[in-house]
């Protein structure tokens, strides 16, 4: 090992072994809590799963009375244990960690709180003692965190977490934010490779996990929620980001003075200067967002179309007024709605045959919307303009409910869905806005169908328009490296 | 009539008679279009409804073969006709208007397009001729507009428009935007007094209709979508607004250079300088928004809580991280998240009994959320702090699905709904964020239940946080007059 490699090893704790976890234990199963964490892992975990408790002898629907999967301590498990989820009282934690070290457990998640997060000297001491007993022989997620969600292996801390595996990795200093992100993913048409909730980050911290995801072959897009870093980890963060080629989106909590006070109460973290974070994010082409919703929506756009550079947009509206408002909003965010080139314009003109429409950009199809074939052709032609980088189309919910159609054309919806998918044909982002108006049940069905087609639908332009220039900026930054 | 009144009369065309419309005709019913506009008005119109067509003798499910409700011209109708919806070809319009004048019709909506909106000299001439033939004896909405939606009387231009009547008036230069606003209202828990889609505004324009709504006893909140005004109407606009005491929210289309080009194509309107509009809106305390979604969301907030002045906010979060992000966002929009006063803090402390919670502002209830009674008490106490102007609470969808609850407490949802309604008890806005995560069906049910309670729910903080300081500014402006 040369010096550089040695230094790297110190900077970034290695957890590449987690891709091969094949056995796990839930330590501190709770009868009162109806074996919550055990049950959640039992839902989908693919390997050997053990329950650890000093007294419990049998768990319904888990060990079938054979007692071959319940042990007093982790040391008593006959086979190996790669990973342990720990939810014991703080007073028991040192003993449990000693057992795990002795057993050769490689990774533990510590759900237990009241360490440095408590803001007491006692809590800080216990956290320090915890690390001493771990002896660098095992890696720790937490304490005060939810640990690891790894759908491919079925590792999941809450009930009904999706068990489909994807290419998005997420690191968060907040278990609650992870829960939102994970439960939201299915309706948003996304899936995760791994999600880490690292809590106090006593051992594995944000930088370690970011470095892991940057190098993880199962991860293509990286999301993060960070409140702050321990002193001296800023250099490592920058080093990790310097080698990053994956689209990366970050939400920084505690940007404001009041927010940083709140963060200190939340995780005991010192959030650092807002500007410092902004500089780092800008320098390394990290997309910097302001809410968890923006974090997920940015991920959806990139998940659907990859990183893209969008400057000139075509708009297709069923309402002239809505089109005008969209132009204003896009212009505000630095995007252009320019005329089509002459040849394309000629082709478009031929597709318009209804009074009250406009074949210029923004396209106003008005009542011609019901001729869905013509809409398909219009979008196809507009996207073939080499100066057009993408297309936004609005279509309120009631168009997807036949009760509102004069002529019940069974081809309407399939053709519109096909038209919405034309972004993929042209390799340019096409983003439909299906306004949340009436018929919410139809909207649910539609979103699910469009998720299958990797078409990201929104209900309000503010959900995604401010994100477009951010994605373009990252595209340019990544390209220049 | 003194001079001032005379001048007023010229400035604002009077349509106060519309509150007493008791008979109407649809002129130009179309068999090919399945009698679309006739059917839509037939759904709920309370008075006498006639169909006018030179040839059609019978309409299924309308006249029962008696032919007593179908006439060749409006002049042939035996009784009076207060209002006519006109959808004849442009070549027939003058003749129809002459008939309406002769018959004594008071108001017509002209759906027909291809007047000044066509951008041709011919179109402009036809529009001028139309006005000459109207002789100021009848008032015109349009041409190129959808006219009047008046749910109390059952006047409605599209199918399944809600027939519940409310206190919100809306004027728009775009029929499509009206459609969105009207179809959205039911799911948003709002109802309209009247909606005007005035198209080209050849006769009745934005200012006339605004003046009407300002003085209309059925209207309490005014919404508007405007692209531009005819030359010389700016003074009248300001005069109307100077006497306005109702909360008023406006969306201006064509703010940007590109948007103003689009608006010219849309309605042939010159949009005027952005700054001029901004100055007028600010001077008269009009809330200036950027999208139709913001227009409706602002209306929802005011509809629920009246105009309010909000500066210091309490946050109640189930996720510490989400709370931190909310603090940052609120701070960005100039709102404060200050500590509670000492007495209130003491009372709050007594309500917290779960590890990992925080009883400071932002309140972090974490797993204590399942004890819904304590949540009710916490909100009740927080809102009783005299320095707190309102409360925001986040609770993702899955909390409203019992499959995700360990203990299936049947009181959970009713108690949380009661807690969400505490804003009304304290006369302070309480805004829940129910993030659109999973369980979308449960969210639909919940939104409907909260609409009944006049509690405006959002799914994303960006939907309403930027609106809060705008509402406060209007409150202060209105108070100072």
Image: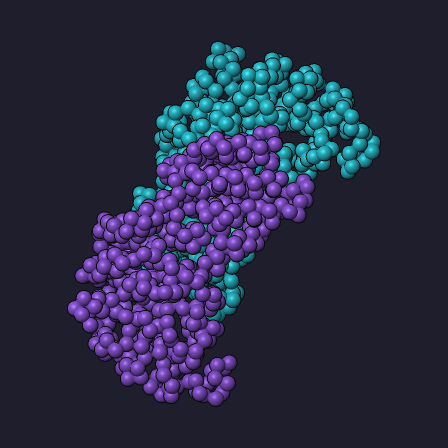
Chain colours: A cyan, B purple
Lateral position of residue A450 relative to residue B355, left or right: left
Q: For residue B155, what is the image quadrant?
A: bottom left
Q: For residue B9, what is the image quadrant?
A: bottom left
Q: Is residue B116 above or below residue A36?
A: below
Measuring from the top left, give residue B154's x and y in whole percent: 44, 71
Q: Do we see residue A339 in this rendering?
A: no
Measuring from the top left, give residue A169's x and y in whole percent: 53, 33
Count of numbered marks: 0
Q: Nearer the viewer, residue B11 or A434?
A: B11
At 50% from the left and 27% from the top, the residue drawn is: A265
Q: Do we see residue B441 in this rendering?
A: yes
At 43% from the left and 33% from the top, the residue drawn is: B338
Q: Residue furthest left?
A: B3
Q: Is residue A122 above or below residue B175?
A: above
At 44% from the left and 87% from the top, the residue drawn is: B68
Q: For residue B369, what is the image quadrant?
A: top right
Q: Is residue B273 above or below residue A373?
A: above
Q: Quadrant of the image for the N terminus of chain B?
A: bottom left
Q: Is residue B51 above or below residue B151?
A: below
Measuring from the top left, give residue A353's x and y in whole percent: 35, 67
Lateral position of residue A117 relative to residue B82, left or right: right
At 59% from the left and 23% from the top, the residue drawn is: A114
Q: Residue furthest right?
A: A66
Lateral position of residue A459 relative to residue B213, left or right: right
Q: Nearer the viewer, residue A266 or A75?
A: A266
Measuring from the top left, give residue A459's x and y in whole percent: 45, 51
């Amino acid at each position: 090992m040369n010096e550089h490699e040695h230094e790297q090893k110190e900077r970034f704790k290695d957890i590449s072994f987690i891709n091969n976890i094949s056995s796990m234990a839930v330590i501190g199963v709770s009868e009162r809590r109806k074996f919550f964490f055990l049950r959640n892992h039992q839902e989908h975990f693919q390997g050997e799963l053990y329950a650890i408790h000093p007294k419990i002898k049998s768990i319904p629907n888990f060990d079938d009375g054979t007692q071959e999967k319940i042990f007093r301590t982790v040391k008593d498990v006959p086979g190996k244990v790669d990973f342990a989820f720990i939810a014991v009282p703080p007073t028991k934690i040192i003993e449990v960690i000693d057992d795990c070290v002795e057993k050769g457990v490689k990774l533990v998640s510590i759900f237990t709180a009241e360490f440095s997060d408590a803001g007491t000297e006692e809590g800080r001491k216990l956290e320090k003692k915890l690390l001493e007993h771990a002896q660098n022989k095992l890696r720790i997620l937490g304490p005060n965190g939810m640990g690891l969600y790894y759908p491919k292996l079925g590792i999941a801390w809450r009930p009904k977490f999706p068990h489909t595996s994807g290419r998005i990795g997420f690191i968060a200093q907040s278990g609650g934010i992870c829960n939102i992100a994970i439960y939201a993913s299915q309706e948003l048409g996304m899936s995760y490779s791994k999600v880490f909730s690292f809590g106090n980050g006593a051992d594995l911290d944000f930088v370690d996990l970011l470095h892991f995801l940057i190098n993880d072959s199962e991860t293509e897009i990286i999301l993060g929620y960070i409140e702050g870093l321990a002193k001296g980890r800023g250099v490592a963060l920058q080093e990790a980001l310097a080698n990053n080629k994956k689209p990366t989106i970050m939400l920084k909590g505690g940007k404001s003075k009041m927010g940083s006070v709140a963060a200190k109460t939340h995780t005991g973290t010192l959030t650092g200067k807002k500007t410092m974070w902004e500089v780092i994010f800008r320098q390394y082409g990290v997309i910097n967002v302001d809410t968890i919703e923006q974090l997920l929506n940015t991920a959806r756009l990139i998940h659907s179309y990859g990183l893209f550079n969008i400057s000139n947009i075509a708009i297709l509206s069923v309402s002239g007024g809505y089109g005008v408002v969209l132009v204003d909003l896009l212009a505000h965010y630095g995007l252009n709605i320019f005329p089509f080139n002459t040849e394309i314009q000629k082709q478009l003109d031929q597709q318009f045959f209804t009074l009250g429409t406009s074949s210029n950009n923004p396209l106003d199809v008005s009542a011609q919307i019901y001729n869905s074939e013509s809409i398909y052709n219009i979008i196809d032609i507009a996207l073939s303009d080499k100066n057009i980088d993408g297309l936004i189309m609005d279509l309120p919910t009631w168009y997807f409910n036949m009760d509102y159609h004069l002529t019940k054309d069974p081809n309407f919806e399939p053709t519109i869905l096909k038209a919405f998918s034309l972004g993929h044909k042209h390799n340019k982002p096409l983003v439909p806005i299906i306004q949340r108006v009436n018929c919410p049940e139809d909207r649910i069905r539609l979103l699910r169908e469009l998720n299958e087609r990797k078409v990201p639908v929104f209900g309000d332009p503010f959900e995604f328009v401010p994100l477009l220039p951010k994605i373009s900026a990252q595209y340019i930054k990544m390209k220049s490296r």
